[in-house]
Image (cartoon, helix red, strand yellow):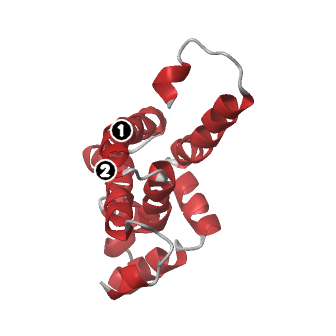
Amino acid sequence: MRVLALFPRIQQPRFALTLAVIGALSFWLPDLAVHAAAGCKFDSPHARIITFLMPAAFLFAYVLARRFAAKREFKWVVAAMLLGVWLTGGLFMTLAATECGGGFAGPDGIRGGLLMIVLSLIPLVTCMQAVYDGSGLALLAVTIGPFLIWCVLASGVPLPFRRHLR
């Protein structure tokens, strides 16, 4: 509750936190599932799968979350969801690496895993971890994609699917 008091400008901090959790889970759970299924045999076909699966799951969650946000008049849905993705990336990638002897199962154990999670609060570290994890392109697509869509919508160019994007 006190953490939510740190953000006085956010009109609905609990809803923003909920959206951050939804964003994190929708994006990182497919990565975790593919890593768990592949185990130590994770290779480029698996990386291709998560490159498409992770942004697709995030987009699906965004479309659903946007409907609830519209009822609450909350406008920062993508920002809240992306915050969740970036802040929890280290945790989920460490969990994914545990399956094959890294992460929490690595030589440093819990201490090394916790260090990587704390370091992943720095965006550059999260980006480097994602590239190593195989989810770098998915993270790039989910981060830059909404900005590109916003640029197209703000340009005023008439598009046949424009009403579906708002």
Q: Is mark 2 on a helix, strand or loop?
A: helix
Residue for badge 2: 29
| Residue at 34% across, 88% down | 2
Q: Which of 149 and 116 is in front in this view?
A: 149
Type of amino acid under label 2: Leu
Q: Quadrant of residue 158?
A: top right
Q: Give the label on residue 160, or none.
A: none
Q: What is the number of callouts on the image? A: 2
| Alpha carbon separation for disc pair 2 and 1 | 9 Å
Q: Do the residues labelled 2 and 1 touch (CB within 8 Å)?
A: yes
Q: Establish if 65 lies above or below 12.
A: above
Residue for badge 1: 57
Q: Quadrant of residue 54?
A: top left
Percent position of residue 39, x then y: 30, 50
Q: In which quarter of the image is residue 67?
A: top left
Q: What element carries label 1?
A: helix
Residue at the farthest top position: 160
> 10 Å neighbourhood of mark 2: few (<14), some, or many (≥20)?
some
Query: Which marked residue is nearer to the observer: mark 2 or mark 1?
Result: 1
Residue 108 seen from this side: no
Q: In which quarter of the image is the N terminus?
A: bottom left
